[in-house]
């Protein structure tokens, strides 16, 4: 349709994206419980979303993968970002 | 010679078309479909909820969609999508357009074959009335 557009045609324009279900993964994270978490002062996500490239890296069994995790302080809502090193493990 | 319209008329035309999406009881839909026509649309592979109202008032003959909610659990289909429709909550189609990887009405990245459970998002959508 777009290629046949003439003067006087109506036109729809847009940008869409498909994210394959298999491209989105989650890594369950073991959360060490510092006192602040137990006191309810920190909200810590229990999982991480990984990109396809990161998953591929993990599946390939490479030594480690750098990732970041953002936690949000309850109350102030202040976000803090930390670096993590994920190491693949075969149970 | 082509028939042309003033900007005011184009705004009216665009508003008329996109306002059809708001006619149902709930917000309308952007549906990605297999090949079809406005009169006989193809099977829907993904359904994304439009806002209510779906589009802002047209400017310069073009109405731009408000936020569109991603379909995070698409129905999917083994065949690729080729068209999209904007429609009201009841499925009455206001516009039917082409979808392809590039150089189309709606350009879709990540592949045109939508699998069951895939996430489909649309970051930009606009409708322009005839010049």
Image (cartoon, rainbow, N blue to C red):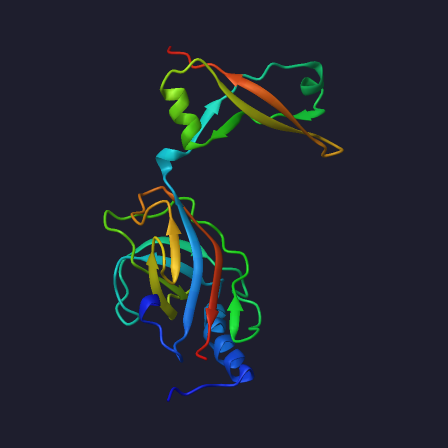
Q: Residue at x 48, y 80 (%)?
A: B13
Question: Relative to the observer, which residue lies in front, B74 or A5?
Answer: A5
Q: How many marks?
A: 0
Q: In the drawing, does residue A7 fall left or right of residue B37?
A: right
**x then y, percent, for residue B38:** 31, 70
Vertical placement of residue B34 versus A72, above or below: below
Whether residue B89 sits left or right of residue A74 in the image: it is: left
Q: Percent position (x, y) of residue B33? A: 31, 58
Where on the picture, by quarter, is residue A9?
A: bottom left
In the rendered image, which quarter is residue A20 located in? top left
Of all residues shown, which one is farthest toward the left? B79
List x then y, in percent, for residue B113.
29, 47
Q: Is residue B91 above or below residue A25?
A: below
Out of A47 and A9, give the one closest to the viewer: A9
Rendered view: B57 above or below B104: below
Residue extending farthest to the right is A76
In front of the other: B13 or B24: B13
**Residue occupying the point 38% across, 86% down:** B2
Q: Residue A33 location, x and y as percent?
A: 63, 15
Q: In this view of the protein, can residue B23 be seen by the observer?
A: no
Q: Is residue B113 left or right of residue A87?
A: left
Residue at left offset 42%, top offset 60%: B30
Q: Is residue A74 visible?
A: yes
The quarter of the picture where the N terminus of chain B appears is bottom left
Q: Residue at x 46, y 63 (%)?
A: B28
């Amino acid at each position: 349709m777009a290629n046949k557009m003439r003067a006087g045609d109506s036109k729809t324009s847009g940008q869409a994206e498909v994210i394959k279900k298999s491209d989105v993964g989650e890594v369950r994270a073991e959360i060490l419980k510092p006192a602040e978490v137990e006191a309810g002062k920190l909200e810590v996500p229990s999982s991480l979303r990984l990109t396809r490239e990161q998953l591929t890296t993990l599946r390939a069994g490479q030594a480690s993968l750098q990732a970041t995790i953002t936690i949000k302080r309850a109350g102030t809502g202040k976000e803090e970002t930390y670096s993590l090193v994920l190491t693949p493990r075969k149970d | 010679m082509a028939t042309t319209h003033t900007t005011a008329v184009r705004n009216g035309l665009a508003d008329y078309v996109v306002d059809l999406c708001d006619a149902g009881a709930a917000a309308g839909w952007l549906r990605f479909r297999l090949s079809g026509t406005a009169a006989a649309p193809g099977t829907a592979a993904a359904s994304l909820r439009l806002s209510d109202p779906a589009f802002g008032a047209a400017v310069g003959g073009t109405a731009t969609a408000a936020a569109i909610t991603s379909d995070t659990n698409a129905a999917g289909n083994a065949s690729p999508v080729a068209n999209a429709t904007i429609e009201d909550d009841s499925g009455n189609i206001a516009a039917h357009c082409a979808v392809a990887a590039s150089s189309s009405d709606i350009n879709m990245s990540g592949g045109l074959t939508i699998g069951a459970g895939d996430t489909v998002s649309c970051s930009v959508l606009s409708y322009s009335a005839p010049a």
